[in-house]
Amino acid sequence: MEFGFWDIVQILGALAFFVYGMKIMSDGIQRAAGSQLRNILRSMTKNRFLGVFTGFLITALVQSSSATTVMTVSFVNAGLLSLVESAGVMMGANIGTTITGWLVSILGFKVKLAHYSIPLFALAVPMILAGRGKIKYWGEFLLGFSILFLGLSYLKGAVPDLKGNAEVLDFLAGFTGWGILSRILFVMIGALVTVIVQSSSAAMAITLTMCAQGWLPFEVAAAMILGENIGTTITAELASMVGNTNAKRSARIHSMFNIIGVTWMVILLPFFLPLLANFTESMGMGDPYSSEGMPIGLSAFHTAFNLLNVIMLLGFVPFLVKAAIWSVPMKEDEDENEGKLKFIGAGIRTPELATIELQKEAAHFGEITARMSGFAKILINSTDAKEQKKMLKKLKKYEKITDRLEIEITEYMSKLSSRENTPKTSLRLRSILNICNDLERIGDIYFQISKTIERKIEDQDYFLPEQRDNLNKMIDTVDEAFAIMVKNLNSPSYDDVSQDEAKAAEKAINAMRNKLRDHNNERIGNEDYNSKTAMIYNNVFSSLERAGDHIINVSEAITGEI
């Protein structure tokens, strides 16, 4: 039997077709049901048992354990899930991903669904071209479903049949007689394949196809599937690299769960597989040791392994959490590292599933900007040169931080905007973009105030006690507006935010500015009232009023008015 370069290209092309179909299918259902998936993940994880069911349900729906684990890591990163809750979701995702194996083994090898793929195109494409909103996204789901099984059909045709080729099978048999070392070798091969194709479902499809064509015996294929369970943890680990400490710990729990499970199953595999074979034969599923019954047998093995692993380790979740905390220690400077994004960066996903992290990031941005008011107040009231210098340095640092946060959030959002969004998601992204723009402008205003005060200090000009008291009252009024803004930014849903408090605070700022301006104008010209200081004083309270304008803009953007 000849097997050359062109055959390898055919296999790679068929595999790419399969992976592309899975991506379209997963993205389509995430767009169609993105907000519902977020709500499920946030509301159905109150304990680890519900978390397992939630992880299973979401993974079964989106047909991607990677999407579920990355979503979970990002929710832990955003503080919406605890480590214990995330552990349950990760375990459930492992069970949910076995559904793919059943779909492939039953529909791909038994029903020959590829025959129905072209008619499905006839249904899906009109939905995409003529549909709007969810109809279009369900069309994408159907299109991806069709491409996936068409790709699987091509993959089966591209992989040559080795059932009658004794030489190749004898060569492979040389690697299967080393006992537990052989099992570890094929576990490593399965993990490597998953890392290369970045999809445990695709790796599973390759394994099932090779079994159906007589390439792999049942024991080898089972070991490779165990390796695929380890390989899929790489996705969560990569997603957590740009996250905070808890995100890294969540990914570590997923890795430990899978590694522990694979370890005990590798040891028990020679005893477990015959028991499974007896069960599948008694249930009429066929002999898993035969090439015809192997795809179903491997799917049963994959599900049984993950179910048993969840049952065994669910009670040990607190210990897994402790081990993750020990293995990923808290960085000493993490709480002081205000200049970096905290919640986004864990991979670009569908915009519908990323808006929650963007909202958290906008709230974080708002909290950072609000701190600048406190620094400015200390600077205005301080007579200590060392403290003044410290506040000037802080305000300069925070102005740079606001610039950087706006750029990084905007860059992330531009990547999301390049993908197709629902109308509601587009509106939400536009709101967050406007929020970040206003927060950056507030940072600029406080930096300008600091430069004004710095020149006043250098020229040895001094505020009168009444001027300083009035500025303190103005800052307190602005701080009340900041508190309302931060509360609105931290609201779980922008749809529930009311502008009443924010508008009342903005009116109070304007009234205070008018009062100070009128009083300042009346006093200018008096002998005891320095005109140069009066101009600086006017500059500062006018700048604070402009900051108030941007603060109300933020609340208006939250409610979608800007």
Image (tube, rainbow, N blue to C red):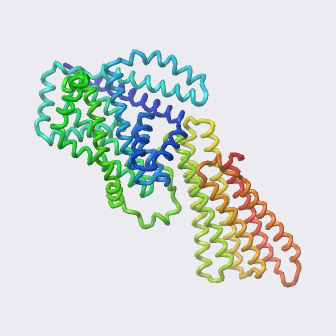
Q: Which residue is drawn at 35% across and 48% down?
A: 254
Quarter of the figure with the N terminus: top left
Q: 11 or 366, which lies in front?
A: 366
User: Is residue 542 rendered to the left or right of residue 164?
Assistant: right
Q: Where is residue 448 in the image (x, y as percent from the top left)?
A: 68, 66
Q: Of residues 169 and 105, which is closer to you in this image?
A: 105
Q: Is residue 141 above or below residue 482?
A: above
How many labels were placed on the picture?
Answer: 0
Q: Residue at x 84, y 74 (%)?
A: 520
- Occupied quadrant, residue 63: top left
Splitting the image into 4 quarters, where does residue 89 fall?
top left
Q: Is residue 64 left or right of residue 505?
A: left
- x then y, percent, for residue 378: 64, 75
Image height of 228 relative to 556, above or below = above
Residue 527: name its quadrant. Answer: bottom right
Q: Is residue 238 above or below residue 448?
A: above
Question: Residue 387 location in percent, x, y?
Answer: 60, 79
Q: Which one is in front, 2 or 67?
A: 67
Q: What percent of the width, then of the height, locates residue 68?
A: 43, 41
Which residue is depicted at the point 53% across and 38% down? 34
Residue drawn at x 32%, y 25% as measured from the top left: 105
Q: Is residue 213 visible?
A: no
